[in-house]
Amino acid sequence: MMYWNRPSECMGRETLRELQSQRLVKTVERVYYNVPYYRSLMQERGIVPEDIKGIEDLSKLPFTTKDDLRNNYPYGLFAVPLSEIVRIHASSGTTGKPTVVGYTRGDITTWSELMARTLACGGATKDSVIQIAYGYGLFTGGLGVHYGAERLGASVIPISGGNTKRQVMLMRDFGTTVLACTPSYALHIAEVLEEMIIPREELKLKYGIFGAEPWTEELRQEIEEKLRITAIDIYGLSEIIGPGVASECHYKDGLHIWEDHFIPEIVDPETGEVLPEGSEGELVFTTITKEGIPVIRYRTRDISKLTYEPCPCGRTHARMHKVLGRTDDMIIIRGVNVFPSQIESILVNIGETEPHYLLVIDRVGNMDSLEIWVEVSENLFSDEVRKLENLKQRIANEIQCTLGLSAKVKLVEPKTIERSQGKAIRVLDRRK
Ligand code: DLL
């Protein structure tokens, strides 16, 4: 049993609740006095910080959503001056603008600590050789896992995503024992390993720390068999901290939420009402130690359920069920979060196409592929091939620039895309 921080991970529930209450009270004060947005929201509801005496008062507080972050783009929800921020990350917003988050030096320390916990919970130790194939950059995956792995004292290979043959070669040559990447990329790596005819015995791989996108138990089994490893599910989101919010232990029966830093709730996605333990609903988190951008009751749009039953691993923190779905239309393609509305605004901005489009997502080999079908006018369609090629290229480039995702564009004749009677169907996901 490898704990990274036993006193915190195995803290009695009473003590934990007490700690959460103290930290919540401080957080509410911090946002009330430092973030005008939260102050006016609380004033509108007639709440003053003194009304929040502990965790039992949590539901008095208003929710925060991705839209609130967008409306305060880029730094409006920061609770410290920019001079205190040492790192900025961003993730997809629902339309053009990304969601921006900032970390103080203290936040980076907390994040590293929580990622060290997460990695240890999944089986890594200071003797591990960790290959980090999550993307490095504005995405929180690469750097988040990186700092945690160094904090743990492991040997870190910061390879980032892509160039799969090289991943496999270095995995063998450098003696990687832990692979950290998205589950779909892990499957792709497994496939390339087979193609390269490298015998499994030449690898030292033991564990996979996979997350950033939904995956099924079936996919887990396939990866575990192909790579002959234990595959662990880790969960997180930029708005809360990045990876390092919750992690499975080797019992693989729900993900432990690091509750001394984040208070989870499950709410009815329609009414916002808090649901009792075990109910399926939308996950909501309140950060209670963050300095740069604390968030109050953040609506994740992820569907899950909570259990407070003790886990045989000895950790006392609540467990969330593997993510069951989303309450909105966000899709994750090769680890990149995509809202159909983002593609729509790109198409509208470029013009020259009709407002009828379909995102066709598939799995080619083990890699997600995205094809965008979009209607063009009769006139344009009968125009020169060169013009059409040029338009396709411009759309694809714009998507690459805005989302960092390569896509194929297929221009189709008017009325080819099926019209729907009710809500438009914008996504055809063939991966399932
Ligand atoms: O994906 C942070 C992360 C990086 C987590 C590396 C794990 C590993 P965002 O890009 O902000 O942050 O995307 C957050 O991804 O709301 C979920 O919908 C989805 N997601 C993340 N982890 C899982 C998971 C990172 N284990 C959004 N299972 C979240 C299912 C996940 N969905």
Image (tube, rainbow, N blue to C red):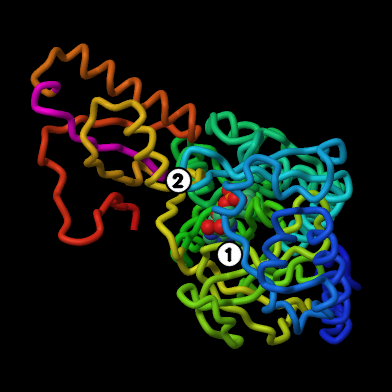
Magenta stretch: give its range.
366-380
Q: Nearer the viewer, residue 199 or 279?
A: 279
Kindly identify the residue that appears in the image at 25 percent across and 59 percent down.
423
* Disc 2: which residue: 338
Q: Is residue 224 visible?
A: no
Kindly identify the residue that appears in the image at 79 percent across and 72 percent down.
48
Snapshot quadrant of residue 169: top right
Kindly identify the residue that appears in the image at 42 percent across and 41 percent down.
342
Where is residue 5? Give x, y as percent.
Answer: 88, 66
Badge 2 or badge 1: first in the primary sequence: 1
Q: Position of 261 compared to 68: left or right?
A: right
| In the rendered image, the vertical position of residue 87 relative to residue 249, given as above or below | above
Q: Position of 259 compared to 213: left or right?
A: right
Q: Nearer the viewer, residue 260 or 5?
A: 260
Q: Main secondary structure of the magenta part?
A: strand
* Disc 1: which residue: 299
Q: Position of 139 compared to 184: left or right?
A: right
| In the rendered image, the vertical position of residue 201 relative to residue 237, given as above or below | above
